Structures are given as structure tokens and as C-alpha cells.
């Protein structure tokens, strides 16, 4: 299974004075089982790009293939596509509308026409995955806290059992605790349930920890793409477009400059700690 | 879908029409609308059309864009035309079918109505295309300024209007986002029975309402935090001042009114 983006161009308000090129010649393949991080500045086209993955935006030219089928072809069921390619919007808590948490989560599976039993099971599974305690199932979603609302909204997409899950800045505006909860939920989905993840973010630290591949966007184009190690090696280029590598990368570079023989390919703090501890022990011996 | 609604959107081209004082444009639009409802023959509408066409041409707003604003009210136009066409009494019957009959008077009335509505919409949309909501409200506030003496809260009304206008694009964007978010959850706007469709509409309206309320509350707090206390003693950063081109425009509007009404009523 895969999502394949081919020569995609997207122009906002085509044919008016407000015309603006949103995406320029994007080619990208998302394979089954990947965890892709899409990074870029505000306005670099990240959100616009991911809204093509489930057919919400229509490209000005080029196309998107799902398992090799053109999703913009006549007769292609967008509804089916959207149940397979789940998209969680930025600030998804604003889409909650039902009277109870459980009913809201049922909205998705109901729309794709599952049986009453499946709807209920899916919804309960999704809420459990999202870490919502059972007492909250019959509470109005508007009474929850910000972080809880967000997890309910994510559960609303998970309840359709998507094979691909795309999340647009899922941790924006959350406190560190809420942020970690969401990120570990996503990581679990990827590792345990085998869901392919596309995570949009502008925080390098978040993406570096989990992603198997990074796509850096700038001004509507793919700027660099590769494994986190490969991408962060080009930190000088990232700095040119106003991004930066995670602090760990800079820290290890600095250590190396000072004459310590550390591995500079490491990108997460945990690994860095282990590496440094290892090197200290080696020295002592 | 929502992007098709273009009434009330500013379309910057920097033309001379854009630079006119909003009061001139308000008066011009108001008088233009009066003029099209006074005509008794088609010649008046020819004059109006030439006038309107020239204004549109000078403004630089593409015709396609202006006509797009007519789209949402096509139903209203057709409905009004049909009412006039079938239910006008008269002796000059052209076609009859049981209770329905088309008279020549009715035909003429229907045609008049269609033209009037079209001109009304295009005429007023030209004003909103060429004037930012803020300038427009300022113009209204200034034009109705004398009513303050009658203790009518002109400033407050103007503020409410400008806030309402200011929120149209924001809410549209919001609605667009919510529609996309619910579509991602499999919401379908075309298929399904009536109950499904209602649940889809509810899934959009409730979040929209909630966020509108939240925005309103935030705005009220922000205004309060900056000690907003109404119009008294408030000054403007850019007060409206007439310039030469505004006076010339008033003259042109006057000439149009006299000539079109004279032609439309008395020839």
C-alpha cells in the first residue's frame, strides 16, 4: 500500500488577483509502515500538501495515486479513501459537535456505513487507544480540557481504522505533558498497530525522535528529504531557510570540536546521553 | 463551495474608484439603486448599463468576479421573475393555461425586475469590491453622523457593522476548515438520506457556532482590556477628507442621475 504524489502543483485562487502558487512540482511516495515527518515554516505548504493525500484539495496539475489508483478519477470513492487515509486537522478539537464524547467518535464510522456493532466497537477501541477514561464517554466534549478534547478528536479519526494517519501539528498549543501523551499515542499506533504515519510539525525535536524519514518543505517545494540523520547533517542548509537541527546535533558537534570523539549522527537526547556516558567510561578505563 | 460567495469581499486593484472617499461611493450606490427603480422604459436601463459598465471597467475588477456574486441569488431572480410573469393581471394576454396567464404587462414587469435585481447586486457589489469594510463603515458613520444629535448611537452601530463585516472572511475560512475536517471523517454532502444530511449540516454548524461565540468573547475581552468605551472623544488615525476627485465624482453622479431619470421616465 502506498500514497504517491506525482508532479503536483497547486495554485490558490487561480485566475484572480489573489492567485498564489501554493505547491510547486511535488513528487513524494509514502510507503506502508513509514513514519514520515514533514517540516517547514508557516506558509511553506505543508498543510496544503497533506490535504491532497485524501482528496480534500484538487491539484492544479499533477495527481495523487492511492495503491496505484488515481484518486481524482471519476468513480473513485473519496469516502472510502478518507476512511483509509485518516487526516487529523490542526486544532482538531474545533470539529467536536456531538452531545457526548462517544457519539462524536462514532460520527466517522457511521459515515462510512459500518454496522451498528462495528461502529460501537470501533469507537470504544479508538477512545481506549487515545487514553480517554470510560467515565468520560458520556460527557459533553465541550466540558473536557484542551488536551482531552484533542485526544477525543484524534479518536474520532482513529475510529475509522485508517491505514494511513496524517496529523497536522497535533501538539500545537499543548503543555509538555499533553504533548508527550499525543506523541506517544502516535508512536504506539505506528509500532503496535502498524499504521503509517505522516506527522506535520515545525518542531525538529518532536519529529527527530520518531520519524523514519523527513521531508523538509520550503516555499511550496520539497527542500530536502531523507532519513533524519541525512537531513540534519545538512543543518547549514536548514539554517538558510530559517529552520535548524535539534539541539542534540549541535551539542555533539560542539563536543567533537572540543576534541571528544563522539558519534555526531545521533539526534535524540537519550541516545546522546548514552553515547557520552559510554565515552566517559572508555576514557576512565 | 463557500469560496463562491464573493459579495462583500474586497478586491484590490488600486484603481481610482478604490481611492475615492467611501461617502462618495455610498452616495453613488444609493442614488444608482434609486435611479434603477424609477425607470419606466428600457432606455433608462441602457444609460444605467453604460454607466455601470464604465465604472466596472475603471475599477479593474474582472467582470467574471462580479458575475460570480450574482450566482447565489439566481434563484431569487428567477422566482421573482416567475411571480411577475404569471401573476400580473392585464388585458393584453399573450398565453393562457387554466389559471396561469402571461400578459404583455407581466412580461415587461418580469424583465424590469430581473434587470433591477441584477443591477442592484452588481451595483452594490462594485462598492464592496472597491472599498475595504473598515473604510465603508467609516463612511457610513460619517454620513449618518448628524443622527447622533437625536441620541442614536451611530458609532456603536457602525462598530457592530464593521465587526460583523470583519468576521465574514474569518468565519468563512473557519467553515471551510470545519467542512474539510468533517469530510475527512467521511461526512458526505451529496449522498445519503435526509437524516444523514441533517447530521452532516449539524456537524458543521455547531462547531462554527461554538467558535464564533468564543471569538466574540475574546474580542469583547480584548476591547475591554484596551479600555474601549464607545465613540465619545474617539479620534481617527486617518480621518476622511474629500479631495478633488471626490467632488468630480459627485458631479458625475449628479449628471448620471439627472440624465438617466430624464431618459428613463420621460422619453
Image (cartoon, coloured by chain):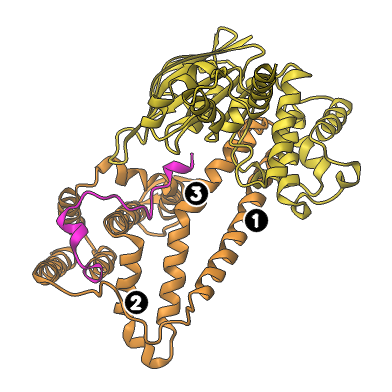
**Mark 2 or 1 closer to N-term?**
2
Separation of marks 3 and 2 at Cα, in angstroms: 26 Å
Residue at which label 2 appears: B141
Separation of marks 3 and 1 at Cα, in angstroms: 14 Å
Q: Out of B76 and A271, give the one closest to the viewer.
A: A271
Q: Residue at x 78, y 55 (%)?
A: A143
Q: Out of A271 and B252, give the one closest to the viewer.
A: A271
Residue at which label 1 appears: B210
Where is B59 relative to B140, above or below?
above
Rendered location of residue A130, percent (x, y):
79, 35
- Residue B246 is drawn in which quadrant? bottom left
Q: Which chain is orange?
A: B
Q: Residue at x 48, y 74 (%)?
A: B226
Do discs 3 and 2 belong to a common subunit?
Answer: yes
Q: Is residue A270 left or right of residue B64?
A: right
Residue at which label 3 appears: B172
Query: Is residue B21 inside the magenta stretch?
Result: yes
Q: Which chain is yellow?
A: A
Query: In the structure shown, which secondary structural element does the residue marked by tag 1 occupy?
Result: helix
Query: Is residue B248 inside the magenta stretch?
Result: no
**Mark 3 or 2 closer to N-term?**
2
Q: Mark 3 and mark 1 in contact? Answer it, CB < 8 Å.
A: no
Q: Out of B42 and A203, give the one closest to the viewer.
A: A203
Separation of marks 2 and 1 at Cα, in angstroms: 30 Å
Rendered location of residue B31, percent (x, y):
24, 69
Report the span colored magenta.
Answer: B1-24
Q: Note whether residue B47 is visible.
A: no
Amino acid at each position: 500500500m502506498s500514497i504517491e504524489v506525482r508532479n503536483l502543483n497547486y495554485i490558490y485562487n487561480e485566475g484572480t488577483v489573489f492567485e498564489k502558487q501554493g505547491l510547486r512540482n511535488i513528487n513524494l511516495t509514502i510507503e506502508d509502515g513509514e513514519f514520515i515527518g514533514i517540516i517547514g515554516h508557516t506558509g511553506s505548504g505543508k498543510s496544503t500538501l497533506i490535504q491532497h493525500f485524501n482528496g480534500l484539495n484538487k491539484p492544479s496539475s499533477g495527481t495523487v495515486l492511492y495503491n496505484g489508483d488515481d484518486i481524482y478519477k471519476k468513480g473513485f470513492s473519496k469516502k472510502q479513501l478518507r476512511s483509509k487515509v485518516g487526516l487529523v486537522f490542526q486544532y482538531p478539537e474545533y470539529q467536536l459537535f456531538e452531545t457526548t464524547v462517544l457519539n462524536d467518535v462514532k460520527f466517522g464510522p457511521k459515515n462510512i456505513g459500518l454496522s451498528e456493532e462495528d461502529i460501537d466497537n470501533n469507537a470504544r477501541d479508538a477512545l481506549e487507544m487515545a487514553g480517554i477514561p470510560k467515565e468520560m464517554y458520556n460527557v459533553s466534549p465541550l466540558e473536557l480540557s484542551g488536551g482531552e478534547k484533542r485526544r477525543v478528536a484524534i479518536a474520532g479519526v482513529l475510529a475509522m481504522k485508517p491505514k494511513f494517519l496524517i496529523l497536522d501539528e497535533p501538539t500545537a498549543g499543548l503543555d509538555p505533558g499533553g504533548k508527550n501523551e499525543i506523541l506517544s499515542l502516535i508512536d504506539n499506533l505506528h509500532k503496535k498497530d502498524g499504521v503509517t504515519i505522516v506527522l506535520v510539525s515545525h518542531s525538529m525535536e518532536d519529529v527527530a525522535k520518531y520519524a523514519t524519514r523527513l521531508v523538509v518543505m520550503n516555499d511550496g517545494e520539497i527542500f530536502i528529504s531523507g532519513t533524519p540523520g541525512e537531513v540534519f547533517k545538512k543543518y547549514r542548509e536548514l539554517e538558510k531557510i530559517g529552520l535548524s537541527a535539534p539541539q542534540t546535533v549541535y551539542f555533539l558537534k560542539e563536543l567533537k570540536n572540543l576534541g571528544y570523539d563522539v558519534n555526531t549522527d545521533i539526534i535524540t537526547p537519550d541516545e546522546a546521553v548514552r553515547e557520552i556516558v559510554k565515552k566517559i567510561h572508555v576514557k576512565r578505563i | 463551495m463557500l469560496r463562491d460567495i464573493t459579495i462583500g469581499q474586497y478586491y484590490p486593484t488600486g484603481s481610482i474608484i478604490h481611492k475615492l472617499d467611501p461617502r462618495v461611493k455610498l452616495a453613488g450606490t444609493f442614488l444608482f439603486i434609486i435611479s434603477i427603480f424609477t425607470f419606466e422604459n428600457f432606455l433608462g436601463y441602457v444609460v444605467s448599463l453604460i454607466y455601470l459598465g464604465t465604472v466596472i471597467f475603471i475599477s479593474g475588477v474582472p467582470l467574471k468576479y462580479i458575475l460570480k456574486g450574482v450566482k447565489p441569488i439566481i434563484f431569487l431572480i428567477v422566482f421573482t421573475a416567475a411571480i411577475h410573469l404569471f401573476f400580473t393581471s392585464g388585458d393584453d394576454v399573450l398565453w393562457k393555461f387554466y389559471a396561469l396567464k402571461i400578459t404583455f404587462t407581466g412580461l415587461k414587469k418580469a424583465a424590469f425586475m430581473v434587470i433591477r435585481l441584477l443591477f442592484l447586486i452588481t451595483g452594490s457589489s462594485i462598492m464592496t469590491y472597491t472599498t475595504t469594510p473598515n473604510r465603508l463603515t467609516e463612511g457610513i458613520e460619517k454620513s449618518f453622523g448628524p443622527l447622533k444629535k437625536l441620541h442614536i448611537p451611530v458609532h456603536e452601530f457602525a462598530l457592530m457593522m464593521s465587526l460583523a463585516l470583519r468576521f465574514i472572511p474569518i468565519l468563512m475560512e473557519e467553515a471551510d476548515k470545519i467542512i474539510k475536517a468533517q469530510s475527512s471523517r467521511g461526512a458526505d454532502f451529496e449522498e445519503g438520506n435526509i437524516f444523514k444530511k441533517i447530521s452532516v449540516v449539524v456537524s458543521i454548524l455547531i462547531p462554527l457556532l461554538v467558535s464564533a461565540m468564543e471569538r466574540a468573547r475574546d474580542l469583547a475581552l480584548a476591547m475591554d482590556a484596551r479600555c474601549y468605551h464607545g465613540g465619545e472623544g474617539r479620534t481617527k488615525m486617518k480621518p476622511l477628507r474629500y479631495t478633488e476627485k471626490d467632488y468630480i465624482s459627485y458631479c458625475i453622479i449628479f449628471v448620471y442621475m439627472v440624465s438617466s431619470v430624464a431618459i428613463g421616465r420621460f422619453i
